[in-house]
Image: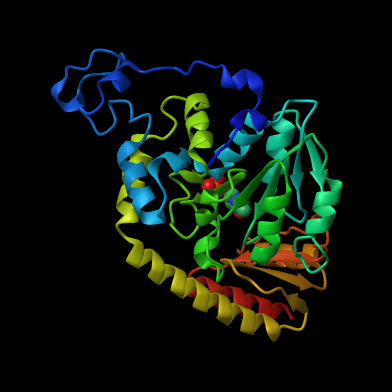
Amino acid sequence: MKFDISKYVRSHLLLLSPYQSARQEYEGNEQAMILLDANENPYNSEVNRYPDPMQKELKTRISQWKGVDENQLYLSNGSDEFISQIIMACCEPAQDEIVILPPTFGMYKVAAKLHGVGIREVPLTTSFELDVSAILESVTKTSKIIFVPTPNNPTANSFDLNALETLIQKFSGIVVVDEAYVEFSSNPSTISWIKKYPNLIVCQTFSKAQGLAGARLGMAFAHSDFIAFFNRIKAPYNINSLTINAALSKIKQQDKVEEQVKQMLSERQRLEKAFASIPFIENCFPSDANFILIRLDDSNLRYQQLIENGIVVRNPSKNLNCENTLRISIGLPEENDRLIEVLKRLS
Ligand SMILES: Cc1ncc(COP(=O)(O)O)c(C=O)c1O
């Protein structure tokens, strides 16, 4: 596929010579070599050596699992890091902007501000759907990236895939489809679309269904030229050995992950049913993720009451069209029991 990356990324970064570790020049022979190149402590422990800068073994496993080529995959310190990296890589400070679709995941705005990049907000419709024509009418030449989390956070719904595809086809910049909750969704992943659309980057994470939030590992899937570019601008050893090992063993345990996802989805159904019988809960928005957004009589009051009962939820009420809402993660069955019991008592 013909693709000109210079259209998308900041020109000075195209000229950057990446940091080279000497070890990269002797790939594959590390076991047989005496390693005196990186000023490490030579006494063996699990982590006395620097990790593989290109995470080859892990990328091989992930690419088999996800059905992509290894050169279409980039790994980051959680998706949060990638969100920041792509803004830094593609947007000129004080000149370019990103496009976000509120109510949306809060990190896009934070990362744009961190890099001195503008933010254009195009609201979702009142039923939390993509407004493709409003987005396309609103964007300008300086709109470099649109962030689309699906399933969306905090609303928990997935977006219509036809609408999403139209957006990717018609927008001349990059569309980042953030699939942090895809394992819980009834929609398929859009990863296979990267073969058709070089302006599409799909993000997934080990933090949600995969159960490795503490390890910090994000995956970005894109055209191989994008991936090669990200590999050139990344910190040399950005994924640590402990995380690499945790992810390798997690990939082998997908049966267990699927079982846990099934359990969470059935708990989600149980919570939705229970919420319907609580008088001060006015609406329980349809969820395609491992959390539920509810609208109630007074979110600040109910949030505080839950805290007093030892339960922490999220109050996203300051987000556009989220007045008097709470966002509740699906917990363990006994935690959900306790939540239901407390809510019933409050009513
Ligand atoms: C939509 C979305 N994207 C990304 C993230 C962050 O993922 P990570 O833990 O991989 O940084 C979150 C976390 O809440 C999220 O909701």
| Position above or below: 279 against 325 | below
Furthest-front residue in this view:
2
What percent of the width, then of the height, locates residue 328?
Answer: 63, 66
Question: Residue at left 25%, top 34%?
Answer: 46
Query: 337 or 139: nearer the eye?
Result: 139
Which quarter of the picture shows residue 104? Answer: bottom right
Residue 63 percent across, percent down from the top left? 38, 49
Pick out the residue farthest to the bottom.
277
Residue 290 in the figure: left or right of residue 122: left
Which is more toward the observer, 96 or 334? 96
Q: Is residue 117 among the parts visible in the rendering?
A: yes
The residue under the point 32% across, 22% down is 24
Q: Is residue 297 rendered to the left or right of residue 92?
A: right
- Going by the image, does 30 lie left or right of 113? left
In percent of the image, x 31 and y 60: which residue is there?
A: 253
Q: Is residue 64 left or right of residue 225?
A: left
Residue 169 position in % (x across, y down): 68, 52
